[in-house]
Amino acid sequence: MTQYQIINLSDLFGQTAKLADLDRYITEAARMAGDGNDVVLTGPGPVWLYLAIAHGLHGRARSLTYRSPVTGDVVIFDHNPF
């Protein structure tokens, strides 16, 4: 069974995400994701933050999945060769 690094985006910011803090959010998400792991993004957050984090993790994560109670798991990218 695959182990996932789960990142709840709301853990990256207080009550409101601020565009001025975007670089810090991306850096922290990258630290939480590690290198070459399967990563799941979840939790409340603005769309721009999801997009920026996904872009920042491309090339670092083996796969990236969006998880929502409404949609379930949605694979954003998967670079696993198997």
Image (cartoon, rainbow, N blue to C red):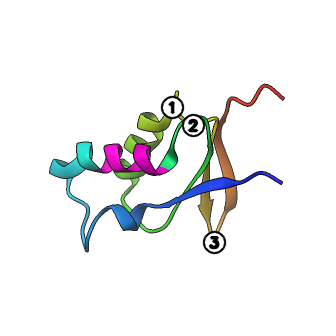
Q: Quadrant of the N terminus?
A: bottom right
Furthest-left residue in this view: 20
Q: Nearer the viewer, mark 2 or mark 1?
A: 2
- For the residues marked 2 and 1, what is the alpha-carbon distance in whole angstroms? 6 Å
Query: Is residue 27 within the magenta segment?
Result: yes
Q: Position of residue 7 (x, y in %)?
A: 50, 58
Q: Amino acid at mark 2?
A: Ala
Q: Which residues are magenta?
A: 25-32
Count of marks placed on residues: 3
Q: Secondary structure at mark 1?
A: loop
Question: Which mark identifies residue 58?
Answer: 1
Disc 1 residue type?
His
| For residue 35, side relative to residue 55 (left or right) | right
| Residue at numbered disc 2 | 61
Residue at which label 3 appears: 69
* Circles 2 and 1: CB atoms closer than 8 Å: yes
Sort mark 2 into few (<14), some (14-19) or many (20+) by Cα contacts within 10 Å.
many
Where disc 3 sits, the SS reads loop
